[in-house]
Amino acid sequence: MISLKQILLEDDNKIYKGLVRVTYSEDGSVMDVADVIRAVKGVTIVNTAGNEEGRDVAMYDVKIRTKSDPQGAFKFLRQECMKDPIIKRFEIATKTIERT
């Protein structure tokens, strides 16, 4: 059960959405990368926005809950995702980041 304190603390958190482009290894798939992104703290929703067949590149629409600035949250996302061996490159479309 949610306490009143938890409800009040949620007000400090804001949700931001943005697009990211990920290049992944041949061992991975679009769904594997989505799972890696979902596992990062603060990520609430991950949707595939498109992928390039044969090039192992995919775009994702990501929503992140954060108290800090959204740029920092997306940089943290990139840092955490790059730790996974199937991800080769992680790019953030900074102009697409907006509050939802």
Image: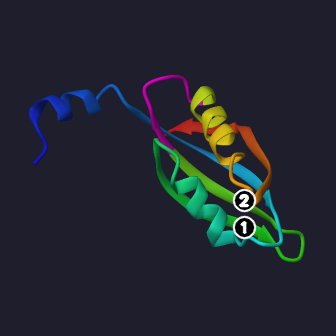
Measuring 75% from the left and 61% from the top, which residue is drawn there?
86
Measuring 37% from the left and 30% from the top, which residue is drawn there?
13
**Percent from the top left, x then y, of residue 77?**
61, 41
**Percent from the top left, x then y, of residue 95?**
72, 36
Local SS, label 2: strand
Local SS, label 1: strand
Q: Residue furthest bottom?
A: 53
Q: Which residue is mark 2?
A: 59
Q: Which residue is mark 1?
A: 50
Q: Using the image, determine if residue 26 lies above or below residue 60.
A: below
**Contact? badges 1 and 2 (CB < 8 Å):** yes
Query: Badge 2 local density, few (<14 within 10 Å), some, or many (20+)?
Result: many
* Magenta-highlighted residues: 64-70
Q: Which mark is residue 73?
A: none
The answer to whether residue 41 of the structure is visible from this angle is yes
Amino acid at pointer 1: Gly
Place residue 33 in its image quadrant: bottom right
